[in-house]
Image: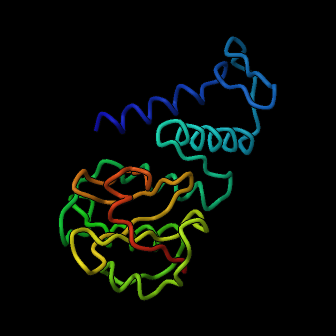
Amino acid sequence: MIKKCIVVLTFVLLARPGLCQNSGKTFPAQNPTATRPSEETNQEQDYFKLDYFRQVAGVALEYTPMSLKLFDFINDWIGKPYKWGGVSKKGIDCSAFVRELYSKVMDRYLPRNSRQQYGYVNPIKKEDLRVGDLVFFKIKTRDISHVGVYLGDNKFVQSSKQGVNVASLDHPYWKKYYYKAGRL
């Protein structure tokens, strides 16, 4: 709850006239009649969202409609608890989270568990990863047991025992258990 309040407060403060600077334009707070076209305002807020995500998660998403949907989805889910077999914001496991993300952000269907999801993708090399690709892990087992969605900059979003979060493929734990990546 506190994270969500900080995120919302940050967006509100950044979007206030007088505090925004974009492309060299400043919007003075002391002139209440100064207006901006709503399209420009929305575009600025979208840039702020992606910049905030870059600063907090360490991921530089390109400014595209898909990246904005992805950011909004992740922001809505970040910090939600993990629950094995869970499929809601009260508790969700990794494969259900990935399935929900693909359904809502990319309008694509994925099966319910990570092993089945691996069967739906075309395997790719780790160095060829792009935003939206799936990353698979074998954690203390011979079978695929975990999945996340690649965000760029060697980061991925997942639901793990720490809840929905952004993690790094460079972290020793994830390096140790990384298996393969795939693209739909």
Residue at x-position 24% and y-position 50%:
162
Residue 127, by quadrant, is: bottom right
Quadrant containing the N terminus in the rendered view? top left
State the residue in front, 113 or 168.
168
Q: Nearer the viewer, residue 117 or 74?
A: 117
Give the image quarter of residue 89. bottom left
Whole-percent x, y for residue 132 in the image? 54, 66
Would residue 74 be found to the left or right of residue 123 on screen?
left
Position of the C terminus, as image quadrant, is bottom right
Q: Position of residue 94 (x, y in %)?
A: 30, 67
Residue 91's place in the image compared with 60, above or below, is below
Does residue 150 appear left or right of residue 65 in this picture?
left
Q: Is residue 140 left or right of residue 55?
A: left
Q: Residue 118 in the image: state x and y as whole percent.
A: 41, 82
Q: Quadrant of residue 48?
A: top right
**Residue ID at (35%, 86%):** 116
